[in-house]
Amino acid sequence: MRTTSIIANLPVADIVKAKGFYTDYLGLGTEEFNMGWVARYASPDTKTTVQLVTRDATAPEDAVISVLTDDIQGAYEQAQQLGYEIVYPLTTESWGHRRFFVRAPDGNVINVGYHPD
């Protein structure tokens, strides 16, 4: 699998209440998106990003990181071939993101996705 980006998914109880710390104090002032249950904030000067997540809206578990790839089908097939547990099958979400969740051998759940441009 070719990874193009890795983004930390931080669990928060309330995105609105948490936002100020990450945007004002940490300087991640660019809101790339906010879907109510997940929001991504980035630095306007660097490639630094973080996602705040209250609870994943469609998957059965929350992921600790989101890994983006340019070959989501190949990544999914490789995870299956290697025998990793697929927590959430390859799905095209209503917002256009294509993703699946896989459990790492250490137990962490990873959101592997592709954003069509």
Image: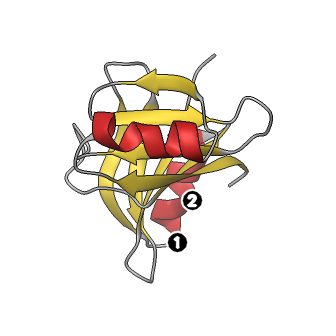
Residue 33: give its label: none
Helix, strand or loop at disc 1?
loop
> What residue did someone put label 2 on?
78
Quarter of the image for the C terminus: give it: top right
Assign the N terminus to one quadrant of the image: bottom right
| Residue at disc 2, secondary structure | helix
Pointer 2 with pointer 1, Cβ within 8 A? yes
Q: Quadrant of residue 36?
A: top left
Q: CA distance from mark 2 to mark 1?
A: 6 Å
Q: Give the image's coloring scheme.
A: secondary structure
Which image quadrant is residue 39 in?
top left
Instruction: Kindly identify the residue that appears in the image at 33 percent across and 45 percent down.
Output: 53
The amino acid marked with disc number 1 is Leu
Q: Is residue 73 visible?
A: no
Q: Quadrant of residue 56?
A: top left
Q: Position of residue 23 (x, y in %)?
A: 54, 37
Residue bearing mark 1: 82
Residue at the (73%, 29%) spot, across then down: 44
